[in-house]
Image (cartoon, grey):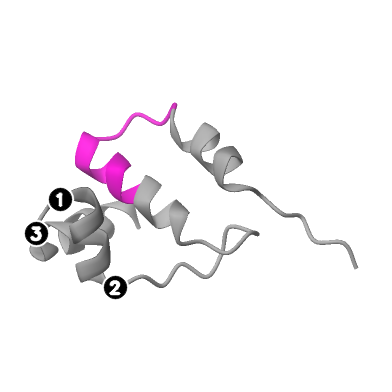
């Protein structure tokens, strides 16, 4: 069975045109770097994401909740 694989740059190209607040877009792009090749299974910790986008973990949780 063939899998529909989405590469990192394909994900970034899909995310770039979205109209979102900058911190939410940065979080979404950071999450995309942790996704499996098919775009699923995104399980980095809040602390990891916060460090990658240079905001505190509490704001990371708030932005993640806004994206869901």
| Residue on which the image places disc 2 | 45
Using residue 55 as the reference point, say whether residue 37 is left or right of it: right
Q: Secondary structure at mark 3?
A: loop
How much space separates mark 2 and mark 1, taking CA atoms? 14 Å
Image vertical order of residue 32 relative to residue 18, above or below: below
Q: Residues within 10 Å of mark 1 (few under 14, many from 20)?
A: few
Q: Earlier in the sequence, mark 3 or mark 2?
A: 2
Seen at 12% across and 52% down, the residue is 55
Residue 35 in the image: state x and y as whole percent. Answer: 51, 61
Q: Residue furthest right?
A: 1
How much space separates mark 3 and mark 2, taking CA atoms? 13 Å
| Residue on which the image places disc 3 | 56
> On the image, which quarter does residue 59 sit in?
bottom left
Q: Which mark is residue 24?
A: none
| Residue on which the image places disc 1 | 54
Magenta extent: 17-28
Seen at 35% across and 58% down, the residue is 68
């Amino acid at each position: 069975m063939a899998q529909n694989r989405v590469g990192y740059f394909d994900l970034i190209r899909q995310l770039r045109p979205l109209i979102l607040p900058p911190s939410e877009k940065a979080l979404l792009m950071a999450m995309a770097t942790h996704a499996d090749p098919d775009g699923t299974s995104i399980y980095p910790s809040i602390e990891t994401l916060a460090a990658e986008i240079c905001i505190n973990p509490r704001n990371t949780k708030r932005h993640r909740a806004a994206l869901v």
